[in-house]
Amino acid sequence: MSQPQSTHGAALASVPSAQADDGMVQHLLSISKSTRAFLSLLLMELDLHPGQDQLLARVEPGVPVSVSALADQLSVRPSTVSKMLDRLMEKNLVERTAHSHDARRTMVMLTPAGRALRGRVATLWEKLEADLASAVAPERRENLLGSLREADELLTAKLRRLR
């Protein structure tokens, strides 16, 4: 049985289902879903949702960052960052301020509670990284990491061209 034809590649139309399931896209989707689900469970312990951890990690303690810069770093829209910030402000983890020279720009800073939680997020990520790395033979880790980095850069570049 063949896959339905899409506007993004008629080549998939002739690929049998079993082979398509073994392709890079299927594996990347599976890895992404599993990683997000696993991370979500770990973040629940910190009372965070997926994505909030990444935002906290992008805000350096004592260094204001603009909403638009955060959106670029996270590869999301500024409106998505604003919604995330609303939720993090409710928890007293971040604060918004006007830019010192341009009142139209909104800047974000971590609160003391945000700094503390940012450290806990880093520890959580390190633990998850160690757990995943320990499941891969040491001689294969660097190749795997290189391949993942390459796929990430390729997809990020393609996505930026489409936005």
Image (tube, rainbow, N blue to C red):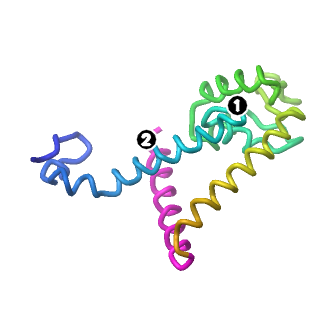
Q: Residue at x 62, y 37 (%)?
A: 51
Horizontal and vertical percent position of residue 92: 82, 25
Front residue of 77/45: it is: 45
The three-letter amino acid code for the residue at tag 1 is: Asp
Marks 2, 1: nearer the viewer? 1
Front residue of 70/119: it is: 119
- Give, as a single range, the part of the protein colored magenta: 138-163
Name the residue that disc number 1 marks. 47
Looking at the image, is 56 positioned above or below residue 10?
above
Horizontal and vertical percent position of residue 65: 78, 38
Name the residue that disc number 2 marks. 162
Q: Would you call the spot at circle 1 few (<14 residues within 10 Å), some (14-19), or many (20 or more)?
A: few
Q: Would you call the spot at circle 2 few (<14 residues within 10 Å), some (14-19), or many (20 or more)?
A: few
Q: Earlier in the sequence, mark 2 or mark 1?
A: 1
Going by the image, does 6 lie left or right of 68?
left
Element class at badge 2:
helix
Does 79 appear in magenta? no
Horizontal and vertical percent position of residue 42: 64, 42
Q: Is the magenta region chiefly helix, strand or loop? A: helix
Distance, label 2 to label 1, CA atoms, is 34 Å
